[in-house]
Amino acid sequence: MLPKKALSVLLLDNVIMTRWENYLAAAGKIIAEYDGSLPLHHFLKGFFKQHPYMGSRDRRHISQLVYSYYRLGYLYKADKSVQERILLGSYLCKAEEAENFTIEAPAEIPFESIFPFQNELSPEINPLAFSQSFLKQPFLFIRTRKDKQEAIKKLLTRNEISFDEWGPNTLALPNSTKIDAIVTDKSWYEIQDASSQEVGNLFHPKPGEAWWDSCAASGGKSILLLDKEPKIKLMVSDVRPSIIANLHMRFKEAGIRDYTSMVMDLTGNIALERRFDHIILDAPCSGSGTWGRTPENLSFFKEEQIREFQQLQQSIAGNVVKLLKPGGSLIYITCSVFRAENEEVVAHLENTTNLKKQEGGIIPGYEKGADSMFAVRLA
Ligand SMILES: C[S@@+](CC[C@H](N)C(=O)[O-])C[C@H]1O[C@@H](n2cnc3c(N)ncnc32)[C@H](O)[C@@H]1O
């Protein structure tokens, strides 16, 4: 194995390069090899495993260069080289790496072209502000529980972690914060994006009501719901058995025991006698409102996938509403910014069932460093 120090003068292809030229070359190599089939952070992990002589500082700078490149989305995709775009991305993202290169930025930048699917956006989204938001990594958010916000703030201060208080239960932290090492009691908080927390404004639970979180994943929305009203009868389900196993663990850590769970595919006929007062459908979606966290999606997502998600959402929504009690409500949620997955699915439900939109819409996070979501309550 090469000593770590060697990297500062070593070489990708036997050409003597400075440390920063080396980083740039390594970033270019990663971009050339990456095909989008894995999340970028997994791919980077694998790449660095194959290049063990790169130390933690090297890995951090190279990763930042790669992420800055993907944050540019389609900006100058046809006009500039990969290397030019890595550097321009670093400059526009105000990344510390940019200080080590001479970078010439164009005087007028067409920021709208960062996000290539402008015509598909929900009407409530501001296209320019949304595009520009990709240049900044969103915050890490926690939702504090059990009146522990003050105690958590003290721990963060003691550990010299900067934070912003967004509400009585919401703290925004730098994205790299290792919160589990600072707050060791897992029942004090949940990691949950600020917009996802806002979805809870559409939950109006009353004691004794039957609620179904139909696409529960590891149960983020369910925990939010139970924190509002623990005395409901909750059922959770998801198509993936592994994610329901995660949910059991997360509920245990959160101190939640009283619920039922099922594994089911909601695209088929749902053989269930029970009926529910309220159903949460946090539908599988493009996730486009969260791509500020995974900007590689800007480059690899295909526009035709939007219609595929819409069909899946309409199929699932049409099936779950059959299990609503008369007078019940459906809370339809996505973390997408696409009209086809949002307003058009709500319109489809209004046209095919007796349900009508009562409240909700886009929850914009893009100007604040949070995800963007869509949540509507129909009854
Ligand atoms: C957006 S995630 C839900 C997030 C979750 N509610 C939360 O707050 O963390 C969508 C979930 O839908 C599930 N899903 C996808 N296709 C499904 C299907 N055909 N039937 C049931 N669940 C499905 C996925 O496994 C995924 O966990």
Image (cartoon, rainbow, N blue to C red):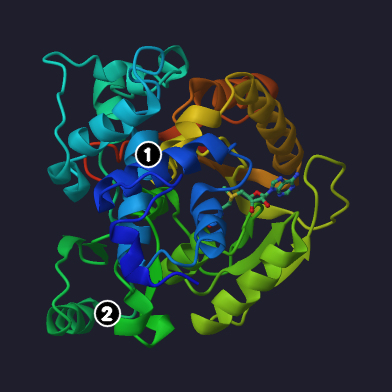
Residue 328 shown left or right of residue 57 in the figure: right
Q: Is mark 2 within 8 Å of ligand 1?
A: no
Q: Residue at x 16, y 23 (%)?
A: 105
Depth check: give the residue in front, 19 or 298.
Answer: 19
Residue 321 shown left or right of residue 175 in the figure: right
Q: Hey, which quadrant is residue 126 in on the image?
A: top left
Label 1 vs 2, first from the N-terminus: 2
Q: Hey, which quadrant is residue 90 in on the image?
A: top left
Q: Position of residue 48 (x, y in %)?
A: 49, 60
Amino acid type assigned to the residue bearing label 1 in the image = Ser
User: Residue at label 2?
Assistant: 147
**Residue 371 in view, yes or no:** no
User: Residue at label 1?
Assistant: 372
Amino acid type assigned to the residue bearing label 2 in the image = Asp
Graded by Cα atoms within 10 Å as few (under 14), some (14 to 19) or many (20 or more), the crowding at tag 1 reads many
Q: Position of residue 127 (x, y in %)?
A: 31, 20
How far, Cα to Cα, is label 1 from label 2? 27 Å
Q: Secondary structure at mark 1?
A: loop
Is the C-beta separation of discs 1 and 2 under 8 Å? no
Q: Residue at x 32, y 34 (%)?
A: 86
